[in-house]
Each structure stands twice: as structure tokens, then as C-alpha cells.
Amino acid sequence: MRFAALFSVCLLTAAAVPPTSPLTRIQDSRDAMDIVTAVKQAHTDLQRQDKADAKTQIDRALNLESKLDQSGALGRMVPIYREAVSVAVFTPSKIVGAGNQSSADRMTIPTVQDVVGESTRVFVDTKRMEQDLKDARKALDSGDINKAQSALAAAESARVTETDAGDEPLAKARANLFRAARQADRELFQDTAVSLGAAAKALETYANGNGPHQAGARVIAREIVLYVPRMPHEPTQVAGRIEGWWERVSDWTATPQKAQTTAQNR
């Protein structure tokens, strides 16, 4: 199971130079999020004078940076997209002719109708964060807690946010494609069809707006609509086809695109 096995918290990602597979993007995003978490914990540890755990958290973050280096992500702005369960609001969708599923199941299979806060994209400057972490570790080794705290504060600020309300339909499309791929991996093709329908609808909504990827969104929406009836005839290819759509949509928000961006420093 490609998507389900890697992401219990349902994070999706793309990268400035796209990796070779959706799995690499997902893992990069998960590692980037874990780095952010470790840095925040290390900063909290130092505020409590817990130098030992702070070192543990810094070392953990640096090990994750090494993983990003191996995947080719280090030095890039790695986006963190919180998809599906963690930030999505699910509402029931009715399935017509859902085969072996019960009537109750046919009425309550959820699709992603709204994605909270997805108009705000978060990017991690992995190279800058790596240097700040090394500075923090060196400062701790020399006993300079104040300098270590300053370096960790700098590491925490190595995040960039970018807000664009027009991207909300793309967030819905990604979330539903994510869900559809997981369902296809489990051969729940009736559920997959519902999620794909929601993704196509979100892409059409985007295509009817003023975004820069209107034509591409309309093309993918059409491809999805035409493909759904064919799924039962090629069950082993469905998940891969959906992952391809997810990659194409994710590419559109893979890097910061606004001239105006703000760095977070919390």
C-alpha cells in the first residue's frame, strides 16, 4: 500500500525539483515535518534546562536532514501539505449501484469537501535549517546554552508561508486524490470512484476561476471522468494512474510562487 503505509498523519508533498515518485515526495514531507517538530522540542528542552534531551532532538533532526540529502531534497524548499484526515472536513456522498456494500455504507462514504487552512502553504528551507542545527549542536557541546537557543530560534524561522485563497480547490483535489489512491490500493473501487468524482469537481471549480493552471485542471478533471468507468477493467493500474494525477496537481503548488512571503519565527 503506497500512500497508506507511509502516512498515518496524511501528509503530502511536492518539491522544487520533483523527485522520481510520489513516495519520495511523501517521505520528504514527513521528514521535514519531523525535523520541525524536533527543533521545537529541542528549543523547549533548553528553556527547561534539559540539555541532554535537547541534544537528542537536535541529533534526530540532523539525521533526518541526512535522509533528505540522500533523497535529493536537501537544499530545496520542501512543502508540507496536511491532507485528508488531519485537516479535512468529511461529508457523506451517495454512491449509485455500489455493489456489495450495504445501503448504509453507500450513503456514508466520505469525500473531502473542505480543507481547513489549505490556502496557506508551508515550506521548510532544509539547507538553512541544517546549518542552524549544526550551530546549535556545536554551542551545546561548548556549554553555551544562550547561543544554542539563538541557533534553534533561527532554525524554527526557516519556514516560509504563502497564502492564496484561489488554491483551495487544488487542496480539495489533492486531498481527494490522496484518498482515492489509498482506496484503490485496498481495491475499494466504488469508494475510489466517489473520491475521484470529488477531485474532478474541485478541479473544475479551479478551472472556472482565475488561477494559472486552469487549462491543466480542466484536462485532468476530464481524464478522471473518462477513466472512472474503466477502473474495473484494469484494477492493478488504478492506484498508479491516480498517483500520476496527484503528482501533476501537486506540482502546481510545489514551490513558493508569491513575491510576498513571510518567515515564521515562533
Image: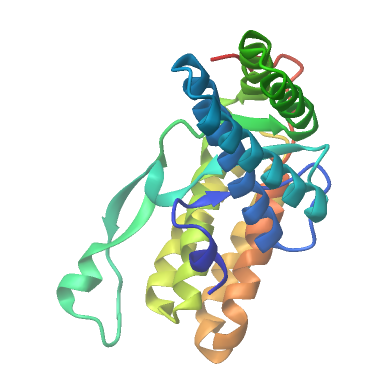
Q: Determine whether, in the image, residue 15 is placed left or right of residue 245.
A: right
Residue 64 location (% of width, % of height): 67, 46
Front residue of 158/132: it is 132
Q: Nearer the viewer, residue 60 or 108?
A: 60
The residue nearer to you, when weighing 87 against 217, is 87
Here the colouring is: rainbow
Left or right, residue 127 beside residue 146? right
Looking at the image, which residue is at 63% across and 20% down?
152
Location of residue 8 (image quadrant): bottom left
Q: Say which of 157 and 191 sits in front.
A: 157
Residue furthest to the top: 146
Judge whether 114 appears above or below 25 on screen: above
For residue 252, which quarter of the picture?
A: top right
Asked whether residue 205 appears in the rendered view, the answer is yes
Measuring 30% from the left and 80% from the top, which residue is drawn there? 98
Residue 209 visible in rendering: no
Numbered-mark total: 0
**Where residue 123 sits in the image (x, y, percent)?**
66, 32
Specify the farthest residue to the left: 104
Q: Is residue 159 above or below residue 174?
A: above
Q: Position of residue 144 (x, y in %)?
A: 67, 12
Looking at the image, residue 81 lies above or below residue 12: above
Q: Quadrant of residue 129?
A: top right
Q: Is residue 241 left or right of residue 191?
A: right
On screen, residue 115 versus residue 96, left or right, reads right
* Residue 167 place in picture, x, y as percent: 58, 34
